[in-house]
Amino acid sequence: MRRVAAAAACDVRLQIRYGLYGVSVLMVLVWGALLGVLSSRVTLRPELLVPPFIVINLQVTTFFFMAALVLFEKSEGVLTALVVSPLRDMEYLMSKSITLTALATAETLLIAAFLFGRDVHWHGAIVASILLGVLYTLAGFITVVRFESINQFLLPSVLVITASMLPLLAHFGVAGHQWMILHPVEPALLVARGDGGAGALAGAIAWCVAAAVWARREFRRFVVKA
């Protein structure tokens, strides 16, 4: 765990240097302003809006930030150097997941608190944010690690992000929940709403574990064996 802690501290410094924290602050201000204007015109229902907001907002600070970091590290030879460093593949993924999930969770919950205060189902929102943060971070790595440029990554990223939002159709009543039961995001969305109980929590954790196994395999395929 010492290597993970050291890697996480290094990741935070790099994320600050690359301007990711500045982007996160900007997103808080923009989302807060937009939703604040909207709340002055219509009544915002936290039980309806907070869960999908968590699903959507976390994508930038985890999925896309992870992709940006991997491309930066590839261009600077950092990933190549990791192969001969003491840091193991899973420790690398853990460090990225911890730092980006913490940033994304803080950003998302800060906006939710500003808009809804105590009306938010906070336990579900916090747990869902953490689970989705880990899932999106790993998905970002899985998607981007095979590419060398942002241009190659753009189309696959759009497809992945679009697919990740399909459970919102059920959330807003456009489709039945039975169609989304095996979707990776659906269990965490249920947790955010306070539905599904232990089964939803277990399902969300299981998807995070599956994503970690897949990400580790892709690390060995595209980084170690490259």
Image (spheres, rainbow, N blue to C red):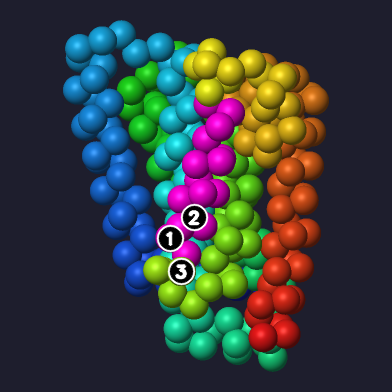
Q: Is residue 131 magenta?
A: no
Query: SS at mark 3?
Result: helix
| Residue at the image position 69 percent from the left and 24 percent from the top | 179
| Residue at the image position 45 percent from the left and 86 percent from the top | 76
Residue occupied by mark 1:
154
Q: CA distance from mark 2 to mark 1?
A: 5 Å
Residue occupied by mark 2:
157
> Residue 223 placed where, x, y %?
66, 80
Query: SS at mark 1?
Result: helix
Disc nearer the start of the sequence (3/2): 3
Q: Which residues are the magenta region?
A: 153-168
Residue occupied by mark 3:
152
> Which residue type carries mark 3?
Gln
User: Would you place residue 49 above or below residue 80 in this image?
Assistant: above
Locate the N terminus by quadrant.
bottom right
Query: SS at mark 2?
Result: helix
Left or right position of 221 against 76: right
